[in-house]
Each structure stands twice: as C-alpha cells, then as structure tokens.
Image (cartoon, coloured by chain):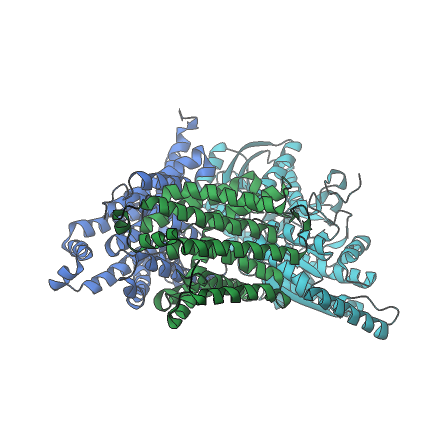
Amino acid sequence: MGSDPSLWLALGLMIAFFALAPIWVYPIFLMKVMCFALFACAFNLLIGFGGLLSFGHAMFLGTAGYAAAHAAKAWAWNPELAILFGTVCATGLSFVVGSLAIRRQGIYFAMITLALAQMIYFFCLQAPFTGGEDGIQAVPRGMLFGLFDLRDNHRMYMLVLAIFLAGFLIVWRVVHSPFGQILKAIREHEDRATSLGYDTDRFKLLAFVISGALAGTAGATKSLVFQLASLTDVHWSMSGEVVLMTLLGGMGTLFGPVVGAAVIVTMQNYLAQLGAWVTVVQGVIFVLCVLAFRRGIIGELAHALKRPL
Amino acid sequence: MMKFTNRLKLSLLASAIAVIGATPSQAQISDGVVKIGVLNDMSGLYADITGPGSLIAARMAVEDYMKASGSKLKVEVISADHQNKPDVGSNIARQWFDTEKVDMIADVPTSSVGLAVAKIASDKGKLHVNSGSATADLSGKACNANTIHWAYDTWMLANGTGKAIVKSGGTSWFFLTADYAFGHALERDTEAVVTKNGGKVVGKVRTPFPTQDFSSFLLQAQSSKAKIIGLANAGGDTTNSIKQAAEFGITKGGQNLAGLLVFLPDVHSLGLNIAQGLMLTETFYWDLNDQTRAFSKRFASAHGGKMPSMVQAGVYSSVIHYLKAVDAAKTDDGTKVAAMMKELPTDDPIFGKGSVRADGRKIHPAYLFEVKKPSESKGPYDYYKLVSTIPANEAFRPLSESDCPLVKK
Amino acid sequence: MEIFGIPSQALFGQLLIGLINGSFYALLSLGLAVIFGLLNIINFTHGAQYMLGAFVAWLGMTHLGINYWLALLVTPFLVGATGVLIERAMLKQLYKLDHLYGLLLTFGLALIIQGLFRNEFGSSGMPYPVPDVFKGAINTGFMFLPKYRAWVIVASLVVCLATWYVIERTKLGAYLRAATENPSLVQAFGINVPRMITLTYGFGVGLAALAGVMAAPIYQVNPTMGADLIIVVFAVVVIGGMGSIMGAIVTGFGLGLIEGLTKVFYPEASATVIFVIMTIVLLIKPAGLFGTQK
C-alpha cells in the first residue's frame, strides 16, 4: 500500500465525509456523487497513470447499467448479482475494445475508443431490451442477499458507500503495486519500457480492462440507485464529462477524480435551472483547466504541499 | 437517521398547529401549502411547445381559480428543466417530492420522462398530471392511481389523423418513422388504424434518431407512390422532413404529408408556405370558439404574443381541475386528490366539458385540422382550418380495449 | 431495371443524394485535415465553427439584409477571424504539450460556443431561404434534384480541388508543408512560421464556416447542427488519413455515397457504417487510406 501519511489522512477524511454527510445532504445526491467518483477514478487509472485517453468510456458505464437494470427487472435478480452481472459485461466489453484499441497510440487510440463507443450507443438505441429513448425504467432495487430491502435509501446508501470504497481501494492498490509502477513507466516512455523486456501491450490491456470493469461497477450501481438505465449513460457527452471531472480534479492523483466528480455533479444539480448555461460553464472549466490549471484541484494542492494525493 | 426525526418533528408540529388553529372545515394540506411543480423542457426541442409558456399557463390557472372560487388555499408554483432526459427528470421529480414538499408535478413532455415521473409519483403517494407526454401507455399498461393523463396521447393522434385521412381518400401510406420507442409506437398505432379502416401500408423506413437530412428517405417515399406519407416522428425530425419534402416537390407531385405529432408552434416556425396542406390532429386550437379565443389572447399578452400550444393549454386546464379537486377532497394527498379528480366532471375554457376516467385518461373532443394556404391566412397564428370534429367518446382509446391494471374487466 | 431488388431509378437517386451529403463531409473534413495535417491540432471546435458560419449568415440576413452570395463571401472571413483569435490567444500555448490538450481545449470551446447559442436561440432552428436563382428542381429523369443541392455538389468540388491545388502544388503550400516538418529551419529562411500557422488555422475554420453557410438553406440553422456531425467528420478524416488533403476529399464524397447505399439497403445502420469502416481502417492501415505514417 502507499506509504505516504498524507494519502492515509486524505482517505480518512474522505470516508468520514461520505459517512457523515447524509445527515445534512440529500442521500440520493451523495450516491450520485459516489457513482460518478468511482467512474472518474476508473477513468483516471487509464489516463492519469496509464497515459491513455479513452474518449468513449461512457460505453462501459452505460452497458453495465443496462445489463444490471435488465437483470434486476426482467430476470428479477438480487441487486448484488445484478451489479456483478453488469460488471462482468463491462469487463468483457473492455477486453474486446481494449484489444482493438491498444494496437494504436495517442490520438488514434482515442479515436478508436470514440468510434466503438458510438457503435455501442447506436446498438443501445436500437436493441429492443434497452427501451431506446425510454431507457429501462422502474428497475427494482430488490433485496440485498435476499435479506435487506434496498428501497430504504439509507440501506442503499451503505451499499453504494461500500462499493465505492472497494473500487477506490482497488485503484489505490493497483497504482501502488509493481504493476502500477510499470504502467507509469510505459506512460513516461513506452519504447524504453519495451526495451526493458516488458510486453507493454499486455500491461496496457490489463489496465484498460480494470478501468472498464470499475466503470461498469459504477454504472451498474448507478442504475440501481436511480432505478433507471438510459441513453445518457452511453452518449459521447458522458464520455466528455468524465474527462472533465478527471481533468478538473487532477489527472494522475488518487483523490482528484473524486473531488472533480463532486464538483461537477454539484454544479449540474444547482445550476440545473440555468439550462444550457451548464454546458457553457463546463466548457469554460475545460478551457481554464487546460490553459492555466492543468494539475487540477487536487494536483495543485498536492504540488503546493509537495506530497502525493 | 435525521430524515426520520425531521419528519417526526414536522408531523408533530403540523398536528399541533392543526389541532390549535384548525376550524372544522380546514383542509389537511401538507405543510400548509399546495405546491405544484411544472417540469418540462425549458431550452431544447420542446421549449416552444411547453417550456416557459407552461409555467405561465399554470400561474394563470392558479390566479383564475382563486379568483373564481374564493378558495382559501395557499398555492405555490415552481418549475425546472428536465432537458428531455429521463435521468434528469426523475432526479428532479424525486428531489421535489422528497425534499421540496412538491405535491403535484404537471406538464412533463417527452414520454420517457413522463413514464419515469409517473412511477415515482406512485411510489411516493404523490400526484402527476401529465399534459406533455405522448405515450398512451400512461393511461394504459403503465397507468397507476397517482397519474392522470391530460391533453392528448398517441392513440388519439393515430386514431384521429389516421382514421380521418383514410376516410377522406388517403388509402395508401408510407411511413417515415423515427427509429426509437416513441416513433415505433406511433407507427404501430397508426398502422393498426389505417388497416382497420380499409387502408394499406405500402412501405416504411426507419430513420436514425435524430436525423437532419431526410432527402434519401423522402425519395423512397416518393417512389413508393403512396398517397400519404406518414411522419411518425416529432420535433426537429418532423420540421426537417416537412421542410425537405417541400424542396423535393413531394406535395406538388400529388402526395400528402400526415404529421402524426405536430403542434401549432411547429407550424409557426415552418411557415405556411412549407406547411400548407399538412393534416394533423390536436385537441385545442386558439381560434376554435369564443372561450378559447379569450383565454388565448390573455395568454399571448403574457407570453410575448405567442398563442398557446395544446400542451400549454392543457397545463392550464389540468391545474384548475387539480385545485378544484384539492378543495373538494380537503387534502393534497396525491392518491386521494387523483380519485377526486376522476369523480368531479371537468369544465374549462380550453376543452369545455369533459371527465377523467378510471384509467386516468382525461376525455374531451379532438379535431382534425388542415394547415391553411398562405392566401387563406389572415395573420400570424391563423394557420388551421377545421376539417372534422371527433367527439369525446370516440377520440380516445375505449376502456374496453385498455390494458390498464386499474380498469376492472 | 432492378439492381439487387431496388429499381435503378431509386438507386441513382439515392447515390445522388449521397453525393450531396458527401459534399458537406468533404468540405468539413477538408478544414479538419488542413488543421491537423499541417498544424497537428485536433480541432474539436470545428462543428461549432460550422454552426457559427450558418448563424452568421442567418443573422446577417435577418438583421442586415445580407443576401446569400454576400454571406458566402464574408462569413468565412468573419468566422475565420475568430479562429485566428483562438489560435493566437489559446492554442499557441499548447503546442509544446501533448496533442491531447489541444483536443480538450477545442472540445471545451465547442461546449461554450454551442451553449451560448443554445441559450440565445433555443433548439428549434431558424429557417434560411434558398437563394432565388436556385429555387426549383431539375428533373433528371430518375428524380427531382433541387437546383440548390446541385450547386452544393459543384461548389464543394471546386473549393476542395482548389484547396488541394494550393497546398500540394503551389509555393505557398510548399512553404506550409515544410514549416510543419521543420519549423525552425523554415523560420531560419526568413519565413514567419507562427503567422503562417495562425493564418492556416483561420483558413481551416473559414472552410468550416463556408460549409455552414452552404448548409443553411438545406438544414435548419440551429445551435446543435454541428455537434453530432463533428464525430462523423472526424471519422472521415481518420479514414482518409489525418494529414492527407486528397484523402479527406475522396473519403468525404465516398462516405456520402456509402451512406446513401446503406440507407437504401439497410437504413438502421446508416449512422453506424462510418464507424465500422473507421475501425477496420484503423486496424489494417492506421495512417488512413491516403495517409503516411508520421
């Protein structure tokens, strides 16, 4: 595990925040933040630590969301099985997509992921089971392990918190493992890593699959929280949003994506009455981050404190 | 946790107030205020058909009702933009019901959002009176005791436009269908009506949703030589296909377009040059009679001179009936008010006399219109000529054919 | 006579329409290819700039009475000027960084521009009339071809070929191509490389705006008209080869034809066929059909 005390402190703060916040803040809103935070963490694993910009990551969020929703509604599976099923689907998809995309680098990699994500979008639009524009609605939350009725928002919250922390810790573990180190080496200079004898393609594919799987978990959980799986989750603007969250929070930091997701989701919620201004604000944040704030919120904080975050 | 104790405190407080301050005929209104939320598309595809206009209509309805009835209710109206997305819409609905004490959600265009809000209202025992969504499933297989479907629906559109057109000679049809659930449903319903009345569907093409360029699909429609080209789409798809049909000389070549979901603001933005001859069905038009004219002029003066659409007028009508039911039932509990809305007959300047059925479907007459030629129009918004009236008991799906679980068979 | 079960008349009609769509794909991907090929900038704002072109033409018509022909001339310069501003103020700072930052910046700019216009003008779309000289249709025997659409095909072919000629066959173009390969050396020869880059970006943007003006009478002028188109155009550029001008032109027209055929035989797939092709091309020949590996 990472040895820097600042990481442990930050982890403690984050857990405390999410454990206590539902007392004052609407729990469904917090669950939304956690799901997107997990999504952004998964995405950050790929871009921040692997140096691979996927411009179609929504396909994993959305596909898992549809899969879990279908399992919970049409097959009446328990929630833990539905989420697992969603994750498995996303994992399979990310293996296929990753195998195709890894063959190319840089902008071509991003373009392949975008193209494949568009194909998934159109598939979801037309496949009968996804309900097209309606989405899959009235998804039952079900009984966790057959025992706990998840219609109670507080029980659902505890489940989501557990899933989010588990996913976060997986990312933490991956980043601080030898695998994570090699991944960073590949990001810095792929040819050098190859010359050291590492099969860089295998590492990149594994990172891609882990990232896709966790994004799937986030998506599957989200569709149970909101009891809805819709096309928004596979649209390319969702892929753009996760890039924004990660960029704003801080690429390559552990806590950056969580903060970025929290900021963007909060902004969307409270600026919702302003309609299209939300898009403008998001665009402005993109531009400002790229020009003047490349390290992102947590990145700047980490830089100022001279500690990893 | 806190939410429970909060609710406990509030209900203790409320009961204390009720006991101390209540007179025997006081209504049991939660939190003392009847709060109505107008949820619709404020800035996108349907902003002109619903949008800020619906909010104006709702506020007018509250004012008019309070003045006419002398009611002692305290009513508040808020609004939000669901951007035509079911996830955004259901989030807002949930938050409104859970934390902002909203009692009734009105309007809600875009069927996918309407269905989601209906379910949430049912789960929480609140009320949803929908004027904007098209899907007939809201009073069909997705019906519930907390949802009322006002203004119009796909069955009425298919039956109104489809049947009337076939009977007037449009016996061969070619469909341009937006390739998503709503488009398929509209096509399916209209096809059923066409074949039942002796017509024939000679072809159909699914257009990706949304599409900007219909030239290739229109060409296929043209070569099919069908008398009628049915547009099973909405919003930008409809206006685009109509515009491009004009370019390719479709109507000049003898084929007619049937707009299966077209609103007055759509015709306004297309202009009569392009839209002339289009046949469509609506349940409201500002120039129908003295009552609708009076209402519409008042509405237009508050809405920048724009005449109300069928949906906006529906919001007005539904809010008035809702408040009437709240007063009569002496409560704003969603399930009870919904039952009362079905008990009381309706009467307003929009739809005249009507009623709400057991499946939640509001009944009123529908009208088949044809868009005027530019030479026939006397001014802006003078766009429709009445072709025929469909009486209320024929305009909507009969209860005997309904698949609503509330309807006992 | 029937080909594969479709009457040949209908087929030719569809191919002709495909060619019209292809003209827009070609014009737009030309601008993108110029910008990426010569400047290594991924211009995600291209769709928004296309929309700007249409809106400037519409605004000019409604408020200043500027007709189509004047708009066709003036709009590319106006919008191109905004492109120059963007390049000067923002893009310049990103050249030394990873290309992906340029992508993110232009993506953000696209969101801003589209959001602002949506706020101001809503989403319903504004009508723009076809210029009088092109009103009406030509009866080609197998279909009625609106005269305006015939003009679009001709005009875009002319513009595309002219651009290709300038870049590949003239001295100016040679300077530009040299400057991309080795800026410092070309600068040493006394040529103002940064200015050339700025003007080239402006030119690419101007091409997008030109496409926008030409699109205005066909599609409704609305703030979202570029948003979904941009991804398709990117696919075209990638298939053609991101540095290749001729690749963008040929692929643009070619894709229009293929889409037209798909609409006849299997319409549900017409939106996806481009991405399938792009994936295949990327796997077999990643530099694109006409591109050279960089």
The one of B106 and C213 positioned closer to us in this rendering? B106
Residue C131: tell me if it is visible.
Answer: no
According to the rendering, which colour does chain B have? cyan
Residue C286 position in % (x across, y down): 29, 43
Q: Which residue is the extreme one toward the top?
A: C1
At x 53% / y 39%, what residue is drawn? A127
Q: Which hue is chain C drawn in? A: blue
- Counting from the top left corner in percent of width and height, residue B47 is at 56, 59
**In the image, what residue occupies the spot 59% across and 39% down?**
B187
- Residue farthest along the left direction in this orientation: C189
Q: Residue furthest right?
A: B24
Chain letter for the green part: A
Residue B113 image offset from top left, x and y in percent:
61, 52
Q: Horizontal placement of C170 versus B346: left or right?
A: left
Q: How many marks?
A: 0
| In this rendering, position of residue B319 left or right of residue B245 | right
- Choose top left, top right, bottom left or bottom right for residue A294: bottom left
- Whether residue B327 is visible to the viewer of this picture, yes or no, is yes
* In the depicted structure, whether residue B229 falls above or below residue C92: above
Residue drawn 63% across and 51% down?
B116
C22 is higher (above) or lower (below) than C35: above
Q: Quadrant of residue B1?
A: bottom right
Q: Quadrant of the C terminus of chain A?
A: bottom left
x, y percent for residue C268: 47, 38
Residue A114 higher or lower than A279, as above or below? above
Instruction: Specify the quadrant of the image occupied by residue B330.
Output: bottom right
Which quadrant would the N terminus of chain A be assigned to in this image?
A: bottom left
In the displayed structure image, the side of residue A42 where residue B51 appears, left or right: right
Residue situated furthest bottom in the rendering: B20
Nearer to us in this view, C222 or A187: A187
Question: In this orientation, which residue lies closer to the viewer: A135 or C268?
Answer: A135
Question: Which of A67 and B87 lies nearest the eye of the viewer?
Answer: A67
